[in-house]
Image (tube, rainbow, N blue to C red):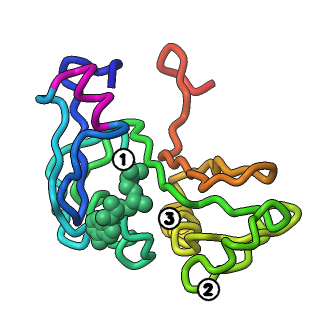
Amino acid sequence: MSGCYPACKLTSYDILPWPGLDGAAEAVTNLFGRDHFEYIVLNQSLLEPTGQYDFIYIDASHDLDLNANTWNKLLKAGAFGPNAIIAVHDTGIWPGDLMPREWEGHRGGKLATCNKVPQGGVAHQPDEIKFVEWIVRAYPSFVKFDFVSANVIRHGVTFLQEKAEWRIDGKPV
Ligand SMILES: C[S@@+](CC[C@H](N)C(=O)[O-])C[C@H]1O[C@@H](n2cnc3c(N)ncnc32)[C@H](O)[C@@H]1O
């Protein structure tokens, strides 16, 4: 946000009312002022994007169909600014050998096994993994980087960006 100050603005959408300042919202408000943060109560299925964004962080329903619908709407509305980065949370796995036994009851015991890391593990939000795989198949102009770990328990995040060729002096390199 510092990079595009003073025009910078963080807009947060959530199906639930805002519980108050915390985390990123508090940091943004402290750094840039209240005018630079907006909270909108909205079900993501009703999102009708109007703005253009440099960074979009998706961490809401964890539902493949809803997320794909949101992605299509964002794309159709031209919401991805030039070189926009889209981050999708919860694409990581919990390495099987590091996962505490009591977590096996998570999601009603319906944890999906996953072999994204060599020793295998558990996808705690399998629809987020399906979502990012769907994006790069349906929209091959986008590339992704899965920021996940095989060595520590992390929820994981995947960054996506549309491919763009570097040019120097206006020419391909
Ligand atoms: C795992 S939390 C993450 C919240 C935030 N990204 C954070 O890190 O603090 C998921 C959030 O998505 C919201 N949510 C769930 N389903 C949603 C939907 N269909 N539309 C909008 N928000 C939704 C929940 O209310 C919850 O606040």
Is the N terminus in the top left, top right, bottom left or bottom right quadrant?
A: top left
Q: Earlier in the sequence, mark 1 or mark 3?
A: 1
* Residue 29 is one of the magenta-drawn residues: yes
Q: Quadrant of residue 123?
A: bottom right
Q: Secondary structure at mark 2?
A: loop
Marks 3/2: CA–CA distance: 25 Å
Magenta residues span: 25-33
Marks 1/2: CA–CA distance: 29 Å
Q: Which mark is residue 135?
A: 3
Mark nearest the camera among 3 and 2 is 2
Q: Residue furthest top?
A: 169
Q: Amino acid at mark 3?
A: Ile
Q: Nearer the viewer, residue 32 or 65?
A: 32
Q: Earlier in the sequence, mark 1 or mark 2?
A: 1
Kindly identify the residue that appears in the image at 28 percent across and 29 percent down. Answer: 28
Say which residue label 2 marks. 110
Q: Earlier in the sequence, mark 3 or mark 2?
A: 2
Marks 3/2 in contact by CB < 8 Å: the verdict is no
Q: Residue furthest front?
A: 102
Kindly identify the residue that appears in the image at 47 percent across and 19 percent down. Answer: 170
